[in-house]
Amino acid sequence: HPRVLSRGLATAKAPSSLFAPLDTFGDRHIGPDDREVGYMLSKLGYDSMDAFVSDTVPEKIRSATNAVSNETIPALSESELLRRAKELGQANKSVKSYIGMGYHNAVVPPVILRNITESPAWYTPYTPYQPEIAQGRLESLVNFQTMVMSLTSMDIANASLLDEATAAAEGMVMAFTGTHGKKHTFFVDSGVAPQTVAVLRTRAKGFGIKLVIGDALKDLSDDTLRSDLCGVLVQYPDVNGAVKDFSDLADSVHSAGGLLVCATDLLALTMLKPPGEWGADIVLGNSARFGVPAGYGGPHAAFFAVTEKLKRKMPGRLIGRSRDAQGKPAYRLALQTREQHIRREKATSNICTSQALLANMAAMYAVYHGPLNLQRIAQKVHGLTHTIKSSVESFGYKAINSQFFDTLTLDVSGAAKDAEAVHAAALSAGINLRRIDEKHVGLTLDESVGAEDVVALINAFASAASKSPISLSDLTPPETLAIPDSLRRTSQFLPHPVFNTHHSETEMLRYIYHLQNKDLGLVHSMIPLGSCTMKLNSTSSMIPLTWPEFGSIHPFAPKDQVKGYLELISELESDLCKITGFAACSLQPNSGAAGEYAGLSVIKAYHESRGEGHRNICLIPVSAHGTNPASAVMAGLKVVPVKTHADGNLDLEDLRSKAETHKDNLAAFMITYPSTFGVFEHGVQDACKIIHDNGGQVYLDGANLNAQVGLTNPAICGGDVCHMNLHKTFAIPHGGGGPGVGPICVAEHLAPFLPSHPLIETGGDKAIEAVAAAPFGSASILTISWAYIKMLGGTGLSDASKVALLNANYMAHRLAGHYTLRYKNGKGRVAHELLIDLAEFDKVAGLKVMDFAKRLQDYGFHPPTCSWPISTCMLIEPTESETLEEIDRFCDAMIQIRKEAEDIITGKQPKDNNLLKNAPHPLSVITLSEEEWNRPYSRQTAAYPMPWLLERKFWPTVSRIDDAYGDTHLICDCPSVEETAEH
Amino acid sequence: HPRVLSRGLATAKAPSSLFAPLDTFGDRHIGPDDREVGYMLSKLGYDSMDAFVSDTVPEKIRSATNAVSNETIPALSESELLRRAKELGQANKSVKSYIGMGYHNAVVPPVILRNITESPAWYTPYTPYQPEIAQGRLESLVNFQTMVMSLTSMDIANASLLDEATAAAEGMVMAFTGTHGKKHTFFVDSGVAPQTVAVLRTRAKGFGIKLVIGDALKDLSDDTLRSDLCGVLVQYPDVNGAVKDFSDLADSVHSAGGLLVCATDLLALTMLKPPGEWGADIVLGNSARFGVPAGYGGPHAAFFAVTEKLKRKMPGRLIGRSRDAQGKPAYRLALQTREQHIRREKATSNICTSQALLANMAAMYAVYHGPLNLQRIAQKVHGLTHTIKSSVESFGYKAINSQFFDTLTLDVSGAAKDAEAVHAAALSAGINLRRIDEKHVGLTLDESVGAEDVVALINAFASAASKSPISLSDLTPPETLAIPDSLRRTSQFLPHPVFNTHHSETEMLRYIYHLQNKDLGLVHSMIPLGSCTMKLNSTSSMIPLTWPEFGSIHPFAPKDQVKGYLELISELESDLCKITGFAACSLQPNSGAAGEYAGLSVIKAYHESRGEGHRNICLIPVSAHGTNPASAVMAGLKVVPVKTHADGNLDLEDLRSKAETHKDNLAAFMITYPSTFGVFEHGVQDACKIIHDNGGQVYLDGANLNAQVGLTNPAICGGDVCHMNLHKTFAIPHGGGGPGVGPICVAEHLAPFLPSHPLIETGGDKAIEAVAAAPFGSASILTISWAYIKMLGGTGLSDASKVALLNANYMAHRLAGHYTLRYKNGKGRVAHELLIDLAEFDKVAGLKVMDFAKRLQDYGFHPPTCSWPISTCMLIEPTESETLEEIDRFCDAMIQIRKEAEDIITGKQPKDNNLLKNAPHPLSVITLSEEEWNRPYSRQTAAYPMPWLLERKFWPTVSRIDDAYGDTHLICDCPSVEETAEH
Ligand SMILES: Cc1ncc(COP(=O)(O)O)c(C=O)c1O
Ligand SMILES: Cc1ncc(COP(=O)(O)O)c(C=O)c1O
Ligand SMILES: O=C([O-])O
């Protein structure tokens, strides 16, 4: 075994020349070194990687070896990459933005920046599906929910959505489906931000919702409209800054049987009467101004809160408090039964990856500041806005609203030549204002604005009005608020101890560490989650993300200010096209599921453009990920399932017959490749041909792209469009459940339909409307995938895929004989992941998949994907980043658990009180007294079943959590003062 | 109790105006909020902070309230500070340095930068005196020692010294003291770097060593010289780049009875025959090119290695492998009996704080790269240097050495007008070369130099020689090495598994986390180490440190390139002068002890300048820190101890009588204020007057300055000079045992004597020579203290001191009745720390200080300073950064331990098998089987004696460590392949 030898002098590849850089990324990214690769190949009976790949990836889909190579994508060393990133960052102009429209210059508390955003302990874990090893993030996400509930005064809130615009769309769909398809009109107030309206328009289409835009306080009396009204969306304060009283509107909407949906701003709600107190049913918005940089559009955590009666219909992930096997309180993902893999085509939302890391940042911001500081920040922002209003009105400008929080829309006609003159004066002072029209400019203040900024801003207005500049001493604080009494907040917020304790940096730091130490991440051990590709998120690729050059850019900044971003984006788009074999790319979708929806919408638009708008059938294999049918439904398609054979392959005959049956209406076929069963199907091109022959388009779900890069590609496989999960294949960290990026690449004929944006030119010339709030989605994290691709280069990228395949196959080899491998190809090969079936253990000993999973926690491993895509299975994906040693450690653990199961099967251990059923074993169990330790095995066997655990043990912090209890006793906020006192 | 109430709306201070920043630092830095401060004051019987301070700090030494105020030191908010730091950083010119002379452009592996250098888990812990909660750092420091031993081929190495120059001085002193004062000549080869020679000259003075500088290969035959020779220092490769064979020299030095000391370079040793293989007795150098930025001079870890027979005389901290109470291997600080607090005036070194964090960075660099990559880096550096030599020689330049590693000294006379012409051409290409003389320039390559850099460098030489520029394709790699066969390394290095395993970034990250999770730092809980001031090291103050604007500057860069640094340095010096009440400052000393030595040397120089060079008596209270007498001896002074009274105060009569007795030779008096017993003595001014009246100068040890800032100062107290530990009072993190900075401030009359530097102008006009290698010592971390002072501002600084006093007094109040408070002032007040005496427990129950300390670990706390300054005591210092809640938690733990002790005293628990004697209780004990659990208490009582431990527990990773075993079985490297295999 290579590890037993000293690896020392044989590891890294020799540099190509004296002049070549030594800090090459490939050797650091790919876990096994050449010797280990050789060892694994030999164990599988191969003498070369090529021979192995030939047996694994079908020959007919292999791509030309130079398609993705160091010629097409040259490799940069780590330091070259950082220099190049700096160059691009500095090509973005640093202009202070007052554009607003939902995006602010956030002040990230340094303790959060360094210890959450920049900490792999926080950014590498996965979505907390295994709550016993995720109590830290779960607590923080509950803080997020509590913060949202308290500030909005709503009954329940989820743990984030992708952005404000898609959150508004989720609200609209909830309002619509609440009427069971009876009422189709959704009214949108004209004060709602244009990017939200654009996304609503896109999303309304698929559901057949009729959008009406107008003045919600005036235009809702019409009876025909009211009788078809499912809901109304207002923005509070609105995009122009107005703070309006919507309480009568709420009554009116309710009396029409609709829901009032309100987009709002958390900081404003520290001063404004919260929507929950004046009748809103759904409240949503962007939480990013709580310490998350604008980042040229994201990622940001949208929040979403509803009233009690809507809670079980709320989209997105919800964290609840339940109890563990010892009866102790414990957090978990609640109501998981709502997830798409269960509801599939009955789902109304496809949200999966969300924005956990950003939600945690925002929650920590509230924990750090507490209610008092939040209010002070709001008061300052408001006071300065008010001061600016007075000053500029003295120059002859006129604010169109007298009630506002942080945003002014100014009529310039009494002071300056036109709006352009004001913009020009602002720009020459390094300031961006909101462009509205020839007569109006807008401005929004935020926490970053200090006294000097205010003076500079006022003086830009002075200059455009040919007035003399003022200085700070000329300014006097306003004496009143520009918020009427009736709309002022009087209720308390955030009284919970957690928001009133950690206000010194020391305490905050300890709280952050206290939580992170409960969570298993890539910093501890392999996370072999099938379909999730938990690979190394390298530091080099993470470093530029938190540079102000990338963080401080407003998404609607003029293009000539963001040349660095645009160059990076175009390089990334081009590289993704090379990798997928497609012609064009959109980076707008904020997650894989959002990519599916975007891709299917593009397909629909294509059919429509050819007069085939009636095509509405989407064929989807039964083995597909649940987001596929959900996305299809959202795109207005009807799902027709396609069977798979007993060998796991797609049933081509069933596909052909369904394609032919539906050929007049066939819109699309969705296929995951390699399949969700973890094999490269040989028939993929045949399947695609069947679809094309019957007038359909092929959507390739790229979640498994890590198996393909440089070896084959979606275009060769026969697809017309695919999404990629940049947070899987392209190394964006999962952040504990987001952020993600789900760009789509499309073939030439679909390029014209790629999504547009209402404010920044993007997409094709027959573009569908926006699918996300920001023109390039979660732009700031594109730096990560860009860096990953540039550092590996073409050759490194395909090496990574090869080793990912090898690692999975070696693992399959080691587990053979101990577990049942469900599927493999004719040569005995799996793809980049493997599916093992545990059904037999249930039959003979009542042992479920979860029992094995929880026991793996005791071994210090995050369990693989459980019960998906087959309920009795585990789907295991090691990725290329894991070394032979780590893979062996995992296999040893699995084999040892198999032995533990054998003892239960043979009756050596009881069926109801054993190592698997009682797993995981947290310290509170291990330290039970002699009397309480009523188990037929020792503490050591429970805690240290393998010798390496003595040195390297990760402890679950609670016992197995009671899911049913949590769902029936749904509690989704953090403990109150009273509960804490009781405790 | 304030914490029981929701603190929410009453915490932070209100902003002074709408225009004032909200991200003020004071509220975040100081733990207790106003309500908590009020509560603590009331418990002590005060109704105002002023009344409390009056009772605590003697009225006669109180400084004017405006001496340190927001007028004298205005407060910047956190974001203002970061903007100002950026401004200063950008005022440093980015010029690529080839100056060499021991300083290189290091390439910090990003995974180390982010997860060690920038991680509070690594930078906040203290020196690992409590090994059971420090196994992570200890392992890493052993890696450092192993790396040094292996690369130098020496028998043993310590865990770092302050810099190469002081390490050389330690080597010289070892050689000298090895002859028991019989031989006084120390010979220094002319190839030794000038800054090393300067420090040797300073240090030789105090010991009466005669330095001779010359050519070691030629000038050592003289018999008179040989008969007085204690040692020889050579540099390998030397400062001009030459690689010479010193093996005959070694024989010759040994035959004269001296030691051969060798300064060397770790990277070179991957290719060169190591000094241990050709006869060196002591090998030392700077490890910084292993991944630690130049940082304008430091901090860097010097290494120091010796042969077997010298090991027990080696200065500095040494980590050894011992075993714990269960017989398991465990690391600890070995041979602690050598420390100054035990040897005092018999010590020959005063080294205390060293460079642990930097040693850890360097060790991790070796772990990450492994022997193969290290060698490749060396080969590349060498190969490129060779290539440059060939190129520039083709222009007519001539290298003066044909044998070299990475450094060339070039005679320019055959090619360019003069050296200046070459420097000018280089500078205009953004390049710094080494300035030697009119005819020679020097250049040194390092890992950061890539192909484009080489071309630019060569072309600068081409330009100065009026030759046409070359391009990369003109270059060919050299075919041979410029190292003769006889000096090539043939032996293996770093074969240990730890250097051959963690080569992928994922594995490296896991190794870092694996180690850090064993160590208790400020990220977990209070570290109430008396005399150490473990306060918050804020993120804002740490951020600029790792900016390239501060990291990438060579310490010998011309002053016009480092305007930002110089401005920051002058601001810091000026603020420190305001705080101490003194006139001038030197930032050169790299630790508190180095400051002591520098300050005393300044005093000596002052006396000499007045023709009183005979003054050589230094009075030092018996209660003084052990570094005081050690430093005095090193400065050539004779220590005369002064008594203290039973009430802890200095015995003024004893002082007077000794001062008078020695009045003709009285040089200095060293006093710590508040005293090391934790009280403000009323007689401090009287004591100083006695000294001055008798012709002496007063040295004030500023380790306890945190009690003084803005309330009093060393000048008012009567001092003439003081050092500060910036790593205590001014918030530089302790880094697990360094870095530190020990600047000295002096009164007007001493200012002319502040230390100079041979290469960069610094110090006074009658300056002593350098005390450290770099002109401004550990310059890069000055950013931290600068930021700390600027963000708190004058008012915040004195608030911090007030709360530090209050926290300590509240703690004393809570522990009263449970423990014996050893000293307090007439009003019942302690200073910023308190001394409790545990002697009684030993008497009645055999319980030692260590038993209480180790039991505190079970409660999740780092024990206070133990058995110093009184062997039966604990010295407890909470600092201002700890909140009331944390202080109460600590007091609750102490009180509970007192109860546990009571059970032992009353016989409820046996004297030899109880919670204290068996402490700490790691998991390996807690999980013992029923049979092995032979303790008269439960697991829960052992592990969770307080309810909050269930939620928040830090686990020691080993049982109590056997010190005696470790010292008798001294093993100071990490396990070998064989040992690992056995294990
Ligand atoms: C096969 C497949 N498709 C789609 C998705 C959805 O991607 P996302 O979570 O980014 O929305 C996933 C997520 O795991 C997946 O595995
Ligand atoms: C009173 C006193 N003097 C001097 C020193 C030495 O300082 P340093 O460790 O920085 O060398 C210390 C260190 O703890 C100290 O407490
Ligand atoms: O939600 C999933 O990642 O499958």
Image (cartoon, coloured by chain):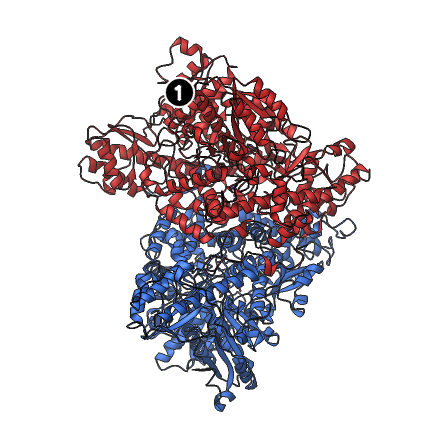
Chain colours: A blue, B red
Q: Is residue A45 above or below residue A362?
A: above
Q: Is residue B580 above or below residue B191?
A: below
Residue at image point 76% right, 31% down: B843
Instruction: Name the side, left or right, on which A883 lies relative to B962.
Output: left
Residue at image point 41% right, 32% down: B270
- Closer to the camera, B901 or B336? B901
Asked whether mark 1 lies closer than 8 Å to ligand 2, one says no
**Chain ID of residue with mark 1:** B
Quarter of the image that includes the N terminus of chain B: bottom right
Residue position marked by numbered label 1 in the rendering: B188
- Closer to the camera, A826 or B37? B37
Q: Is residue B45 above or below residue A747?
A: above
* Other residues around mark 1 within 10 Å, as few (<14) / some (14–19) / many (≥20): many
The total of numbered circles placed on residues is: 1
**Image spot of residue B936 (x, y percent):** 79, 41
- Closer to the camera, B631 or A565? B631
**Amino acid type of disc 1?**
Val
**Image spot of residue B892 (x, y percent):** 70, 46
Give the quadrant of residue B756: top left
Q: Secondary structure at mark 1?
A: strand
Q: Is residue A242 visible?
A: yes
**Image spot of residue A293 (x, y percent):** 44, 60
Quarter of the image that includes the C terminus of chain B: top right
Instruction: Name the side, left or right, on which A961 lies relative to A886.
Output: right
Give the quadrant of residue B339: top right
Residue at the right extreme of this rendering: B907
**Image spot of residue B830 (x, y percent):** 64, 39
Q: Is residue B54 above or below residue A978?
A: above
Q: Is residue A772 visible?
A: no
- Closer to the camera, B294 or A271? A271
Residue at the bottom extreme of this rendering: A223
